[in-house]
Amino acid sequence: MNVDMEPKVLIIGCGVAGPVIALLLKKKGYTPVVLEKVRELGDAGASLMMMPNGLKILALVGLADVVTQQVPHLGELRDQTYTGKTIGVSYIPAKWQSKYSQPACGIKRTTLNLTLKNALIDADIEVHEGWKLKTILEKEDSVVAISEDGKRMEGSILIGCDGIKAMSRALLLKEHQIQPEEATYTGLMQTAGMSPTPLSLQKRPGLLNLYGPRAHLICYPVTATTTSWAITKRDLTEAQETWKICSPAEMILERDSLLEDFKDWSSPALELIRGAERIIKYGLYDRPHLEPKLWYSPKPGRCVLIGDAAHPTSPHLGQGANQALEDCYHLSQMLPTFDHESDADISVEDLQRVFNQFSTLRQPRTAALVKGARAQGSMRVISGGIAACEERDKVLSKGWEDEAAVEVKYDSLFKETFQ
Ligand SMILES: Cc1cc2nc3c(=O)[nH]c(=O)nc-3n(C[C@H](O)[C@H](O)[C@H](O)COP(=O)(O)OP(=O)(O)OC[C@H]3O[C@@H](n4cnc5c(N)ncnc54)[C@H](O)[C@@H]3O)c2cc1C
């Protein structure tokens, strides 16, 4: 098969990792095809924080500017008590552009998704919407993906980028004779919204955390005039992470109930809740880490997982999309460049070697971040009363005292082994 053609790469999912790995592999001579279950990608979810490590990868496919030019860059990181007292502040994000070549900034998830989809179309990469993966058939010389409604697509490689509930992950685990697990509910729920940026935040764009009893609020700008916010609370009743936007009636109920719950909180909590133009509610999930060899199918396997399909995380370190982008970079670097004048198709031995190298490199970093994000979430939302809050705030305050230590922490996140 495919002897005189560029190897076809079946990419499952057109979220964040799918389109970016497709664009990177097209540059290396492959023919990517993106298969997405949603019938027409549109308005869904709230926002994402794009950090310098992720933006460096978007820059490689010419898309970092789309994010960085439409929104104020983060200038500060600030922790505050719900009563308005500053726990700690750092202005290091203002240095990130010169230090790491990219700043940090928020973006609406919908804007990012549609930008990525349009970039695929501009690059002449096939995108099939309404194509939901159900089965994978692996052979020595090819892999076949089969959709829920029976459509078949054959390729040389399959990359599972189908997110936290990935079917590709379940199918690969079965190939390893392992019963696929459900995503794990972290016990935390988020209510997120977008609102006009309150006056108090207009002069200092940054990432603001407000810490209160039994709740945490985070906010950051996502356009020149809009701020995205998310409130995290403990909730034992699991709410699926469907990213569905509340209907107008649900929104009024939700907003009124938040206004009542947060009536004692200082600015900008109430302005943000009152100004909400949209609200979504979802549970926060992650999964225990997979051993590196489970990130890809066993021999003669031609399938590999990246992004949330391999290492879904709760959002408290803002690294889900950024780590998915790092995966794209490393996998695309490790796969050979394909020159259709001289090269034959890629062998299963070569693929297994690359997948092993890739997952061995990426698993420790992503597993540590998933664990770190879960711990951060538990620390942020404590169930005790005022005394427990004061204890937590003291610990937080200590973390800000040594500016050099704060810089080192971010260095380890952003100084990856790529430029
Ligand atoms: C609709 C949506 C909204 C989100 N909103 C937020 C948010 O507001 N804040 C936040 O921090 N994170 C959000 N996330 C998660 C965040 O975007 C991801 O953690 C991160 O970008 C990792 O990217 P990924 O490409 O690995 O997975 P994702 O970005 O989740 O992309 C997975 C893609 O695969 C598709 N897919 C799933 N199953 C199949 C299948 N069987 N066949 C074909 N395609 C399939 C999905 O529709 C999706 O487009 C959202 C995810 C989704 C899907």
Image: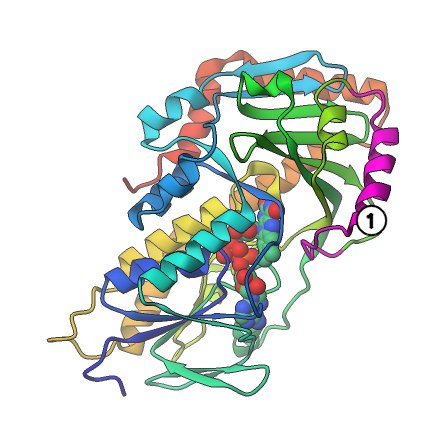
Q: What are the residue bounds of the magenta stretch?
A: 240-265
Q: Which residue position is annotated with label 1?
A: 250
* Identity, as a three-letter code, of the amino acid under mark 1: Glu
Residue 170: percent from left, percent from top: 58, 71
Question: Looking at the image, is 104 positioned above or below residue 47?
Answer: above
Instruction: Indicate left or right for 148 with 365 as reference.
Output: right
Q: Quadrant of the C terminus?
A: top left
Q: Residues within 10 Å of mark 1 (few under 14, many from 20)?
A: few
In terms of depth relative to the viewer, which is nearer, 250 or 88? 250
Q: Residue at x 61, y 24 (%)?
A: 208
Q: Residue at x 39, y 86 (%)?
A: 139
Q: Quadrant of residue 239?
A: bottom right
Instruction: Indicate left or right for 213 with 277 as reference.
Output: right
Instruction: Indicate left or right for 157 with 166 as reference.
Output: left
Q: Secondary structure at mark 1?
A: helix
Residue 413: percent from left, percent from top: 43, 35
Residue 28: percent from left, percent from top: 23, 62
Magenta stretch encompasses residue 262: yes
Question: Looking at the image, is 282 positioned above or below residue 124?
Answer: above
Magenta stretch encompasses residue 122: no
Q: Quadrant of residue 264?
A: top right
Q: In the rendered image, is residue 22 in sight?
A: no
Q: Quadrant of residue 73?
A: top left
Instruction: Indicate left or right for 408 with 382 as reference.
Output: left
Quarter of the rendered structure image containing ligand 1:
bottom right
